[in-house]
Image (spheres, rainbow, N blue to C red):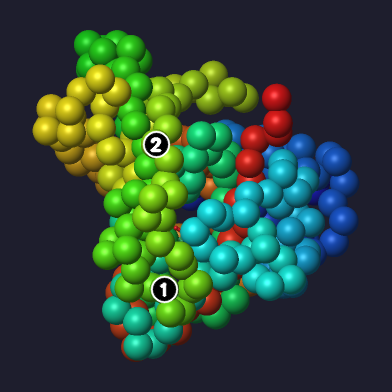
Amino acid sequence: MSGITVRQVAGALGAEISGVDLSGTLSDETVAAIRRAFVEHQVIFFCDQSLTPAQQLAFGRRFGPLNIHPYVAGMDDHPEVMEIIKEPSDKLNFGGGWHSDMSFLETPSIGSILYAVQVPEFGGDTLFASQAAAFEALSPGLRKTLEGLNAIHSAEREYAPTGPSAQKRESMKISDAEGMAGRFTHPMVKVHPETGRKALYVNPAFTMNIEGWSRRESKPLLDYLFQHSKQEAFTCRFSWRPGSIAFWDNRSVWHYALNDYHGQRRHMRRVTVDPLPV
Ligand code: SIN
């Protein structure tokens, strides 16, 4: 009854949704159908949309409260909307490594909604990797071990004064996290609250060590998981056009913004959905 069509795009995750204009007021039925596709497919894509920042905010708010990023300033009049920009002269891009958004917070976000304003003529795709599929592909023994472990997450490396984000500060209003980034503990295996499906919840950008283990002790197991989790069989790839949207589930998906379009401009807007307060 919602009128939307859902087309799966890859084996492990990803679906394209058509038959809906996200700029208007959506019925509860349509939002419920989008939400079902989001939790089932882990990342959903919409094409040929046209959203103002206010319309993107309104769409995002249908799924939960919106996050204000602690280190990346939002738009002046819409602090929840982050502008992700790579200028032609920039060498590095934002999000150019596997990660899940906001795992460095005490209460990580549930999803991110990224809208393409301007895209390069070629390149600039985003990769996604299902951490549920990655978890399910591990041996029963390792799955059981990981289910008993927690890991420490922090923004202290990524947003350090000399960290990877420092070189993007001009284009993106990024501040450094020196002395501000907390360390928060999350289970290494997250149980999805809506589907019950289990997913690995560690990532190379923000996971520092396994709780109770030193960084040196943690590294071999974390490195193994980071290699395992990005295997092609767990991924899908999205090529952007202006007006495209990707909406991914940060509880079970990693993503990676490819940096293969040097000399061209790419401009995206992101809103990030928090869980409902308990
Ligand atoms: C991000 O990590 O949120 C950015 C992804 C992208 O620009 O494709």
Please indicate whether residue 33 sits to the left or right of residue 38 in the image: right
Q: Amino acid at mark 2?
A: Arg
Let me know if residue 59 appears in the view: yes
Please indicate whether residue 226 sits to the left or right of residue 83 in the image: left
On whether ligand 1 comes within 8 Å of the CB at mark 1, the answer is no
- Whether 104 is drawn above or below 163: the answer is above
Q: Which residue is mark 2?
A: 183
Q: For the residues labelled 2 and 1, say whether their Cβ atoms are less than 8 Å apart.
A: no
- Whether 260 is drawn above or below 154: the answer is below
Q: Nearer the viewer, residue 87 or 9?
A: 87
Q: Quadrant of the image for the C terminus? A: top right
Residue 7's spot in the image, x, y percent? Answer: 58, 48
On whether ligand 1 comes within 8 Å of the CB at mark 2, the answer is no
Q: Which residue is mark 1?
A: 169
- Whether 169 is drawn above or below 149: the answer is below
Q: Give neighbour class at mark 1: few <14, some 14-19, many 20+ (Cα, 10 Å).
A: some
Residue 155's spot in the image, x, y percent? Answer: 38, 48
SS for callout 2: strand
The numbered dot on residue 122 is: none
Q: Nearer the viewer, residue 231 or 223?
A: 223
SS for callout 1: helix
Q: Residue at x 23, y 16 (%)?
A: 142
Residue 177's spot in the image, x, y percent? Answer: 41, 55
Q: Residue 186 sits in which quadrant? A: top left
Q: Residue at x 74, y 59 (%)?
A: 57
Q: Quadrant of the image for the N terminus? A: top right
